[in-house]
Amino acid sequence: MARIFCVANQKGGVGKTTTTVNLAAGLAKVGQRVLMVDLDPQGNATMGSGVDKRQLVLSVYDVLLESASIGEARVKSEKCGYDVLGANRELAGAEVELVDVERREKRLKQALALVADEYDFVLIDCPPSLSMLTLNGLCSAHGVIVPMQCEYFALEGLTDLVNTIKQVHANLNKDLAIIGLLRVMFDPRITLQQQVSEQLKAHFGDKVFNTVIPRNVRLAEAPSYGLPGVVFDPSAKGSQAFVEFAQEMVERIEKL
């Protein structure tokens, strides 16, 4: 049975998509069956998985509107080793179209239930706002992975996200919890980043993943080639860190 995780943070530009595609590729590398769901209308996770969003016949938009199943809409990313339920600009319209429909926040959850036995992990890349799309992701998930930079404003954004997760847990999804905080784009030479990292560990304890993703040029370059860094340059420090993170995720889930 698949374990379903949202990669979410209400602050933009913190590396959510980079985390999602590289964790998906890392999990595939360590032998896990993975489905990556792109819930962002920009479709960056789709393109970053080697899938052209402009060529999609069916997408997550069709799944949310129940005109297609995940089995019909998913595509295999041959280079990356995982399946992709892609997104494109059409998805922006789903917000409006879902306003008046029943069970609108549970559409993705019901669709995923039909393919849950085919995967070990489902990773959902959420948009940076708390929208109907993000709500669908949070209602589907067993937990949330929060990528964050060790900077002052990141701590403020984290407070908002924790409150959102508490609300969804109380009202819509009793399974939802923060699985862990992932420190990304980390530069140990910057004193502030070390201080914020220590604050996180002091406050959240074992909710902070042991793996730290360093600031890495190869990870930043990889999306322009339509690949996760783990596939684009497996020897890069950032790529190796994501494979380590994938192994840590597998170990952490076995303990749950």
Image: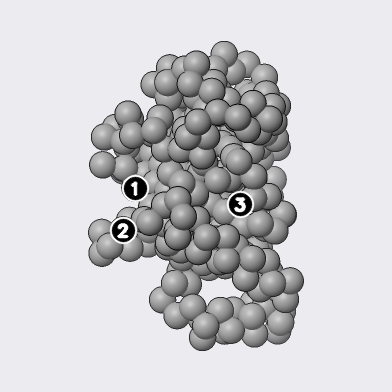
Q: Residues within 10 Å of mark 1 (few under 14, many from 20)?
A: some
Sequence-first disc among 3 and 2: 3
Say above or below: 210 vs 140: below
Residue at mark 2? 253
Q: Which residue type does callout 2 highlight?
A: Ile
The image's mark for residue 31 is none
Tag 1 near tag 2, CB within 8 Å: yes
Q: At 40% from the left edge and 30% from the top edge, which residue is drawn?
A: 111
The answer to whether residue 172 is left or right of residue 149 is left
Sequence-first disc among 1 and 2: 1
Q: Quadrant of the C terminus?
A: bottom left
Residue at mark 1? 3
The answer to whether residue 100 is left or right of residue 24 is right
- Residue that sits furthest to the top in the current view: 57
Marks 1/3: CA distance?
Answer: 18 Å
Asked where in the image residue 228 lies, by quadrant, the reply is top right
Tell me if I can see residue 234 in this picture. Answer: no
Q: Nearer the viewer, mark 1 or mark 3?
A: 1
Marks 3/2: CA distance?
Answer: 20 Å
Q: At 60% from the left edge and 41% from the top edge, which residue is drawn?
A: 132
Say above or below: 229 vs 193: above
Marks 1/2: CA distance?
Answer: 8 Å
Q: At 52% from the left edge and 60% from the top edge, which residue is drawn?
A: 167
Q: Which residue type does callout 1 highlight?
A: Arg
- Residue 238 position in % (x across, y down): 57, 57
Residue at mark 3? 16
Q: Which residue type does callout 3 highlight?
A: Lys
Looking at the rendered structure, the secondary structure element under dot 3 is helix
Asked where in the image residue 152 lies, by quadrant, the reply is bottom right
